[in-house]
Amino acid sequence: ILLLRDGETVEDLLKLSPEELLLRWFNYQLHRSQYKGKAVSNFSGDIKSSEAYTYLLNVIAPANTTPALTLNPLNENDLRQRAELMLKESDKIKARAHITPDDVVKGNPRLNFA
């Protein structure tokens, strides 16, 4: 219900493709965080910088995660190294899956969607 837009029904939401629904959820979570970037509209170019992923991980991580997740990857200017640091943060909540820093930086949409 929280993902509904003004004037939208649950039926409208259920008509979205899995990717559209995940993007809607992703942006909802980003809105709950301190993220100031543009909305994510795809799992390729919009996530290459790892910025949105870093904020997403921080907002969805359980409060009792030890060690706590940080926004430290955002301090790294090299995008590949930033992606690696972001993926290390995702390891803390066992959310890494089968993605590499190169997959993030190259904007591999299939792997990033997964």
Image (spheres, helix red, strand yellow):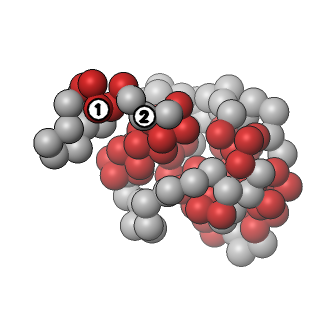
Whole-number angstrom distance, CA of label 1 to CA of label 2: 7 Å
Residue 90 percent location from the top left of the image: 66, 38
Residue appearing at x 50%, y 52% in the figure: 55
Mark 1 Cα shell of 10 Å, populated few (<14), some (14-19), many (≥20): few
> Is residue 83 at least partly visible in the picture?
no
Quadrant hosting residue 39: bottom left
In the image, 31 versus 107, the foreground residue is 107
Q: Which amino acid does label 2 sit on?
A: Leu
Give the side of residue 2 with respect to residue 88, left or right.
Answer: left
Q: Residue 58 has which mark?
A: none
* Callout 1: SS: helix
Q: In which quarter of the image is the N terminus?
A: top left
Residue picked out by circle 2: 16
Q: Quadrant of the C terminus?
A: top right
Is 78 above or below relative to 93? below
Q: Which amino acid does label 1 sit on?
A: Asp
* Discs 1, 2 touching: Cβ within 8 Å: yes
Residue appearing at x 77%, y 61% in the figure: 105
> Is residue 93 at least partly visible in the picture?
yes
Q: Hey, which residue is sitting farthest left in the picture? A: 7
